[in-house]
Amino acid sequence: WVEINVRTDAVDEFAFVDNMCIAEWRGGSETLECPGDINNEAGYAIRDAAPKFEGGYIDDEPAMIMSPPRSGSSAEIRGTFLPVTVPAGAHFRTVVGCLDQSTGCDVKLSVLYRLEGGQEVPLGEWTETHDGSYQSIDIALDPLGLADKEVVFIFLVRANQTDKEHIAFWLRPAIS
């Protein structure tokens, strides 16, 4: 005989870090390549399979690493993803912080969303400095009316100080 177990708790998931290069990346007014070049003064976005958080902890899940422009008039990098269908009951989940080597890191990380034809709306905003800590994020999307809708998500990192390199991470950001 054979016993078959069918999972009824399977959850749809969209991991942004696994789909980084379908996003449009901009450092200020400049379009950026994906994956980015860490030597690009206009900023970069890359995937790190084993990110080292401030304080030295190395995680085994991938992170989306974003570094805004180091000079110029704009101190922000933005990634705009293609529309994602948000399943009912879904949450946006991630952990945000600064990378260990970015000792002068002082950034504001934001996620915005936009429905087709609509305005950008803030989903959340977090300030991070290289202080040895990071933040866990879990936002329910149903109360925002996003269930079963096509939603564009925009990731934004803005440096609070210019002329420095600020390297922030989003640990496995996902809709699940």
Image (tube, helix red, strand yellow):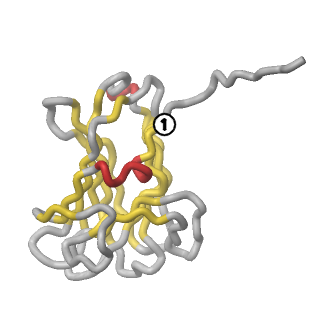
Q: Nearer the viewer, residue 80 or 70?
A: 80
Quadrant that contains the N terminus: top right
Q: Nearer the viewer, residue 98 or 60?
A: 60
Q: How many marks?
A: 1
Position of residue 49 measured from the top left corner of the image (x, y, whole percent):
51, 64
Q: Is residue 76 left or right of residue 124?
A: left
Residue 73, compared with residue 103, is above or below; it is: above
Residue 5, compared with residue 169, is above or below; it is: above
Identify the residue shown where x is 75% and y is 22%. Answer: 5
Position of residue 142 measured from the top left corner of the image (x, y, whole percent):
40, 26
- To which residue does mark 1 refer? 13
Q: Nearer the viewer, residue 139 or 79?
A: 79
Identify the residue shown where x is 41% and y is 59%. Answer: 64
| Quarter of the rendering containing residue 164 | bottom left
Residue lying at the far right in this picture: please name it.
Answer: 1
Position of residue 168 measured from the top left corner of the image (x, y, whole percent):
38, 66
Identify the residue shown where x is 44% and y is 72%. Answer: 99
Residue 166, compared with residue 30, is above or below; it is: below
Residue lying at the far top in this picture: please name it.
Answer: 1
Position of residue 28 measured from the top left corner of the image (x, y, whole percent):
14, 64
Other-residue count near label 1 (Cα within 10 Å), few / some / many at <14 / 14–19 / ≥20: some
Q: Is residue 149 left or right of residue 115?
A: right
Q: Which amino acid, by three-letter code, is at mark 1?
A: Glu
Identify the residue shown where x is 18% and y is 69%. Answer: 75
Q: Secondary structure at mark 1?
A: loop
| Quarter of the rendering containing residue 123 | top left
